[in-house]
Amino acid sequence: RTQVAFVSNSVGYASSSDLRVHFGLGEETKASLEIHWPYGTVQELKDVSSDQRLQIEEPKPPLPDKRHP
């Protein structure tokens, strides 16, 4: 089963949003996560145990290639 959530830290001028996301797994004890970050990186976490809170941070974006001006 696939569940999707979109997270944004701002939805308007001088506003903020809760960055927490909750997914219900029912009787499942493990899940796989696929995270699509704003810079285009896709992060996969496999066999993540249920009943826990994770703090997942976006990896640093790749540095520009300085060999080509």
Image (spheres, rainbow, N blue to C red):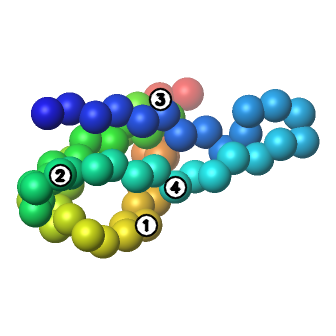
In the picture of the structure, the residue carrying the numbered disc 1 is 55
Say whether marks 4 and 3 touch (CB < 8 Å).
no
The percent coordinates of residue 4 (x first, y second) are: 34, 32
The answer to whether residue 26 is left or right of residue 10 is left
Sequence-first tag of 1 and 3: 1
Amino acid type at image mark 4: Arg
Amino acid type at image mark 3: His
Residue placed most toward the observer, 34 or 26: 26
Q: How far apart are marks 4 and 3 (CA)?
A: 40 Å
Sequence-first tag of 1 and 4: 4
The answer to whether residue 1 is left or right of residue 10 is left
In the picture of the structure, the residue carrying the numbered disc 3 is 68
Q: How far apart are marks 1 and 3 (CA)?
A: 36 Å
* Helix, strand or loop for disc 4: loop
Q: Which mark is residue 66?
A: none
In the picture of the structure, the residue carrying the numbered disc 4 is 20
Sequence-first tag of 4 and 3: 4
Q: Going 58% across and 52% down the picture, which residue do you hit?
A: 19
The answer to whether residue 64 is left or right of residue 9 is left
In the picture of the structure, the residue carrying the numbered disc 2 is 26
Position of 35 relative to 2 (above/below): below
Q: Which residue lies furthest to the top in this view?
A: 69
Sequence-first tag of 2 and 4: 4
* Helix, strand or loop for disc 3: loop
Q: Going 37% across and 70% down the picture, which residue do you hit?
A: 53
Q: Going 53% across and 40% down the picture, which residue do you hit?
A: 7
Q: How far apart are marks 2 and 4 (CA)?
A: 19 Å
Q: How far apart are marks 1 and 4 (CA)?
A: 9 Å
The percent coordinates of residue 3 (x first, y second) are: 28, 34
Badge 4: residue crowd in 10 Å (few <14, some 14–19, many ≥20): few
Amino acid type at image mark 1: Gln
